[in-house]
Amino acid sequence: MDGLNTVLEYLTSVPAWYLATSVDGQPHVRPFSFAQIQDGKLWFVTARTKDVWQELLQNQRFEATSWWPGHGWLILRGRAGLDDRALDEMREAGWKHLERLGDHYEGPNDPTLVFFSVEDPEAFICNHDEWVPLEL
């Protein structure tokens, strides 16, 4: 399995993973749970009305982590690509995912929804003894 698919597996094999942003020196962490690969890049979804989107507009750098029991944890670092180029299939999947979580939008093309890519990614699979870098 290649590095990008390994990252995707770590993010989608758990109920939630955590994405951290930093604005004005203050870190902000929140749960995320949707990830998908499109055009050789990892993509996430949020809403333009959420704090996380406003924070990414100010500082595109983020870090995400996921602990997969029995496998260790993932650390993913990158920069949010703010150009929403989600194709219909991913847009539909992201919208349905958020609806299952209790968020409500007017469909997959609701202008409130926004997809962002992971640019300049670095990823590590970690345990208590080592961080193993993934080739992305």
Image: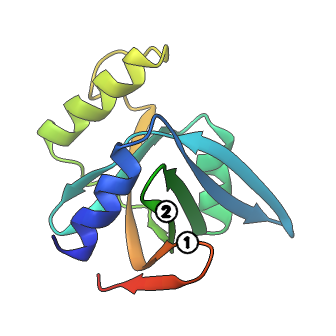
Q: Which residue is mark 2?
A: 72
In the rendering, which numbered label is found on residue 80?
none
Tell me, yes or no, whether the two marked residues, 2 and 1, touch with CB atoms within 8 Å: yes
Q: Nearer the viewer, residue 112 or 22?
A: 22
Mark 2 or mark 1, which has the lower sequence index?
A: 2
Image point (38%, 16%), residue name: 100
Spatial CA distance of label 2 from label 1 is: 5 Å
Image point (80%, 60%), residue name: 27
Percent position (x, y) of residue 66? 52, 54
Q: How many marks?
A: 2
Which quadrant would the C terminus be assigned to in this image? bottom left
Image point (34%, 44%), residue name: 12
What amino acid is found at the position of numbered circle 1 in the picture? Asn
Neighbor class of circle 2 (other Cα within 10 Å; few <14, some 14-19, many 20+) is some
Residue 39 sits in quarter: bottom left
Give left or right: position of 9 versus 53: left
98, above or below 74, in the image: above
Which quadrant would the N terminus be assigned to in this image? bottom left
Q: Nearer the viewer, residue 92 or 122?
A: 122
Give left or right: position of 50 versus 105: right
Neighbor class of circle 1 (other Cα within 10 Å; few <14, some 14-19, many 20+) is few
30, above or below 123, in the image: above
Q: Which residue is mark 1?
A: 127
Percent position (x, y) of residue 52? 63, 47
What amino acid is found at the position of numbered circle 2 in the picture? Gly
